[in-house]
Each structure stands twice: as structure tokens, then as C-alpha cells.
Amino acid sequence: MLPKRSADWRPILWCAAMPVVVLAQYIRPELLPYLCPLSFYFAMAAGTIAHNHNHVPTFESKRMNAIFANWVSVFYGYPTFAWVPTHNLNHHKFVNKPGDATITWRHSNSNNIVIAVTYFFISAFYQAGPINEYKAKAKERNPKLYATIMTQIRTWLGVNALLLAFAVGFNYWKHGNAGALHGLYLFVMVSALPSLFGTWSMMWFNYMQHVHTDPWSKYNHSRNITGYVFNFLVFNNGLHTVHHANAGTHWSDARAEHVKIESLVDPRLNERSFWWWVIRAYVLSIFIPPFRTKQVGRAPFDTPDAGVVDAAEVKTDSVEALDAGANAQMV
Ligand SMILES: [Zn+2]
């Protein structure tokens, strides 16, 4: 029942607070303006918790890990098993190089607000293939894993259906037809939009942590956000170089690992302030071109010795890695 590391009590506390914030808004809609921003933050935080849990399961007990993954899926906004084929087995192997289903340079290597905002839709489209293949292979070869995946999907859809039914039914009972419509509005604001933001924000973090970095370099393949408040809020997911160096390191050890290699990373890829980077890269850069990010070192499509690669010719092998990569929460 207990987490393996005492640091994991904090994500568990966050997860315990998530349903309180959601239900408070359904039962007392007048709290929506105050609690809605927190729902959006919790959806993003659930994404970072899902990421950490997929790499280093929180509990010793496999049953507890599966329950925790189901719980997080509901508040993150998508079944968390989907991280395994596209992130654990694929992104961590190719690190934005050809073959990575989540490459930041699919149609352009520019970094501007249009590409940054729409990256989610393009990346989600290309991730659907590996996710579906992973599910199909699990069905064929690993019934236990498949059952875990299906439980996660059913939990995610089932809880959302219940919340929608409750929001519409409860408000219809109180206020009639107008109340039912208000219930629908509540569901969109409290559950649907935060869910979309949870998944959007995780993909965007992937984008900002790799765009214009050098995937062929030992230390410059990722962009780090080093600020302490930011990393407190996202469970050290800002420290990305060390995460790629050893994805099995517990998130609470990432700061100590980062300190060891910080001076080896190109200073342009160690960013203290998340918001200052966002404002510089997407707002000020419109008027002040030097604020645009530039490719640091080699681009992902410039292989060190074989010239330019056509990414379309390189296929992901995430599905082949199914058996090797089945995560502890899944078996
Ligand atoms: Zn990772």
C-alpha cells in the first residue's frame, strides 16, 4: 500500500485532491471561477505524474500501481498506458531523431506560436498508429497486459460518462431544461477542457524540450527548465537532459543528477524561467528576431555521418519492443 519512496506522498496527495476539486465544482457551480484554473493545473500535473509513474512505478504492489494508473488516467484526460508505446519505447529510444513518433520537426523545423500550438494535433495523429498497434499486439500476445489496458480505457470513459450524467441530471432536477444545459457546460469546463489541456500540455512540453536541440549530442539533446517553483509544480519534469540520460532515475533525484551535468549543457538549453522562455520565444520574437530560438548544434535530420535522412522512410519499432518494454504497472 505504501509508496516505494517517501517523495511520492506528494503526487499521491495531489491525486487525492483532484476529485475533491472536480466534485466541488459539480456540486457547488458557483465555485467554478475559483477552482477551474486548479482543474487545468491538476490535469497537467496528472500528466507529469503519469509520466513519472510509467518510468518508475510508485508502489511495490502491482495492483496498487494499476489502480493508481487508472486514477491518474481520469484526471489526466487519457489512459496513461498510451505513454508506453510512444514515449517509453519510442521517444526515449530515438530522442527526436528520425523514427521518433513525436518529432518536433515533422513539417518544419521552425519554432513559432502556430507550430507550437498545433503540434499537439499533428503529434496525436502520428501517435495513434503506434498506440493502436501496441493494443493489438497486447491482445494477441499478452492477455494480462491487454486486460489492464482495457480496464484503464473503461475506467477513463466510465468515470467521465458518470460525471456527465451526474452534471446534467443533478442540474435538470434542480432547474429543468435550462439546468440540463448548464450541467453540460459544467462538464465541458470541469472535465472535458481540463482533459484536453492535460494531454495538450504534455505533448507541448515534449515539443519545447526538444525543438532546436541537438539529438546527436550527449548533453544538448534536450532543453531544461531549471526553476525551482516550476519543477515543484511538475515533479521535476523540467529537468529533461538527465531524464533522457537515465529514465529509470526517480523523479525526486533529478535535481541532484542535473547539478552534476548542468555545466556540460549548452547554456542556451538551460532556461531558468518557463514563462520568460515562452514570452521570448512566442511573443517578443515576433518583434525582436534575435529572441527566436535557433538550432543548437546539429538538427535531428542531419545525421553526423550519413547526411540528411528522409524521416518518412524510417519506421518506429515501438511495437516490436512490446514484450521488452511492458511496464510494471501493466503486468
Ligand atoms: Zn520520459
Image (cartoon, grey):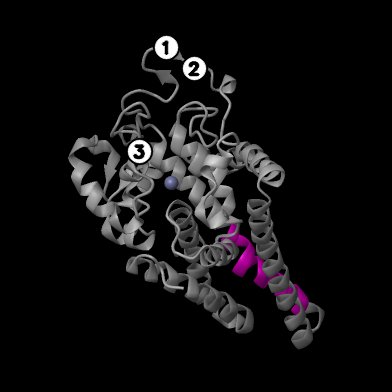
Say if residue 112 shows up in the picture: no
Q: Residue furthest top?
A: 306
Look at mark 1 in the image and give the residue it sits on.
306
34 up-or-down from 199: above or below: below
Q: Residue at x 57, y 54 (%)?
A: 330
Counting from the top left corner in percent of width and height, residue 149 is at 65, 54
Counting from the top left corner in percent of width and height, residue 176 is at 80, 83
- CA–CA distance in space, label 2 to label 3: 20 Å
Kindly report which numbered mark, 3 or 1, lies closer to the viewer in this rendering.
1
Look at mark 3 in the image and give the residue it sits on.
222
* Boundaries of the magenta span: 179-195
- Label disc, if present, on residue 309 of the rendered structure: 2
Task: Determine if the C-beta at disc 1 is less than 8 A from ligand 1.
Answer: no
Counting from the top left corner in percent of width and height, residue 96 is at 45, 32
306 relative to 108 in the view: left or right: left
Q: Secondary structure at mark 1?
A: loop
171 up-or-down from 142: above or below: below
